[in-house]
Image (cartoon, grey):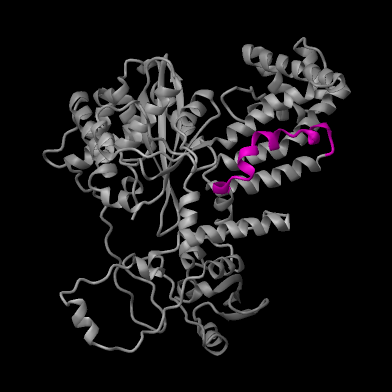
Amino acid sequence: MEGERCAFFSWKYGHYFEFLSAKDFNIKVRCTLCVGEKVLSTFKNTTSNLKKHLESQHGTVKLTERVPPRGPKQRAVTSAGPTSPKQQKLDFGAKPVSDEELKKLVAQYIVEEMLPINTVDSPSFRAIIKKIPTSVNAKLPHRTTFTSYLEKEFTEMERNFVGAKKVTLNEIDFVSTTADFWTANNRSYMGVTLHWISRTTLERHKVALACRRIRGRHTYDVIGTEIENIHSSYGLLNKVVATVTDNGSNFVKAFQEESTPKDDDVTFSDLSEILSAENESDGQLSLPPHRRCASHTINIICTRDVEKHLTTNAESRSVYRSSTAKCTALWTKSSRSTLASETVEEISKRKLLIPTSTRWNSFFDAVKRIAEIPMGELNTLCTKLGLKCFKDQEYQFLHEYCMAMKPLTAALDILQGDCPYGTLLPTLEVLMQKTQAVKDDLSRMTAIQIRFAGVLDDKDALLAAASCPKFKLRWLRDAGRREQVKQLLTAECCTTAPLANNPASVPSATTSSSQGEMDFFTFEAEPEEETYSAEKEVMDYLMSGYDLQILHKFPSIKTIFLKYNAPTPSSAPVERLFSLGGLVLTPKRNRLSDKRFEKLLLMRYNHWFTHPTLLFPP
């Protein structure tokens, strides 16, 4: 109580000192601004000594007054200026929500969380909505009216594709698509996603175009017709540079049947016959070039090709089959018995991963999880579950298998990300080097070279990699091949050189003067403009940095980048569309119509209610 009556505790600059002790009429404090332990002494009823210390030792410091403990209206001020303005009073009252805002917020919640539309009829949900301050006429509609609102929003989203944003779509020169089939609840759907690179920001963008119900057999002609219909409905027939699908024979045949003829297979036709037969089409389709999903191909190597390679000789076949059989027994036991699952978690302090045929790398991840368990704990677990224990040779095989497969699985994860097509060849080159560096039986496997034989020397893939600033030609170790790709890039630059560099392509101005009149005038010869040099642009590009934005300095290489890197090396984007579809088309919603399912799924994938401007950004 004596300390509380001390002048120091109510002093406006007292927070720059730390109180130490009090004795009789004096107190001791420590200055927090001084370096070290600077202890000062002053009388209890005055702070003059402390004030002199601040003026002499800390005169250059801008001191701030402490807000006194009483008087909440007082404000802290500085010793060098007037009192700061009063703080604005915070308004915690929520503004009323309009009828349109309310419907949009509820639609965002329903679509983004993939909830049934009849959620708006739920009494508990409507009770929550009633607590939101709304305008006079704002009212949450019931299911029928709300469904009509979602239909209108989907029409608006489609209008962004082919209507109001058509100018923006026309400005995109090169796009690519991914396509695949998906089956759920005894229904089959074809999904298609669209991908392109912004010319201004060089960022990748994607949207979902369709997830349409397909009835009957999935034959190559059905696939080709449906893909062409989806492309033509959005005006993309002449813009799609490639379509990426998996390695299914029906997809491969659909694009092979529509492959373009060779340059020397030239035929001449009568124009009148072509025009007269326009309405009598013979079923000829117009499909873009086909690209096989690289991630799916690597997954085939990791499963089928590796199994075939390991079963070629008796020694590796025996240990491979015995070890995988014991792993399969563990997976089966833990997935079918809750008691076994609890035993696994109790002994190994983790849960086992169960491989699935539809998820890439799932077998490797499942084997790796078992190999991470110490052998003693693993055999203890097998004994408690009544399974055969692992031998030393089998346990060692699991570790060697994980070590050999790690480069393949790492490459698969890279390629199934949101990366340009130019990532494919550098990834494969590094993958083959890392696979050969592993000194085991799998290093002699040539499945990568065989599976990707048509890609390793593909012109489009080489140009895509060379036009990526982060790769350029650095991924090529052979000097001869590096020079070959450099010449290929130079030749492509000559083909895609900007029209501004070609004087012959500039149209002449319209004039009413006759040629004879112009011959009368005599002018000095105009200086010739510097001609475009593809070799110089390529050399400057190769000597520049590795940032993506340097492409703005090289217009021809930028055009090559936009064209050949529009595709993705993997069909993972459309697989992610199906993953969302499984959350929308649940067994409890099996009465959802195909059209409404497609609309809800596309609005969710494209984030129409949260980021509508991302569909076609400026």
Give x and y (percent) for residue 461. 57, 47
Pick the front one: 473 or 151: 473
- Give the image location of residue 366, x and y in percent: 68, 26
Compared across the picture, whether 417 is left or right of 376 comes to left
Residue 382 as seen in the image, left or right of residue 603: right
**Residue 36 found in image quarter:** bottom right
Q: Position of residue 416 (x, y in %)?
A: 56, 39
For this orientation, the residue located farthest to the top is: 386
Q: Which residues are magenta?
A: 439-461
Closer to the camera, 47 or 599?
599
Judge whether residue 58 is colored magenta.
no
Residue lying furthest left: 137
Residue in the picture at 53% in, 25% down: 248
Residue depicted at x 15% and y 38%: 138
Total residue callouts: 0
Relative horizontal placement of residue 462, taking residue 396 as reference (left or right): left
**Which residue is at the front of the view, 421 or 159?**
421
Can residue 415 be seen here? yes
Q: Quadrant of the C terminus?
A: bottom left
In terms of image quadrants, where is residue 142? top left
508 in relation to 101, above or below? below
Q: Residue at x 34, y 42 (%)?
A: 236
Which of the 4 quarters of the picture holds residue 299? Answer: top right
Q: Tell me the residue at 27%/38% (across/down).
A: 158
Residues 106 and 571: in front is 571
Point out residue 256 in the picture as x, y percentages from the top left corner.
Answer: 49, 30
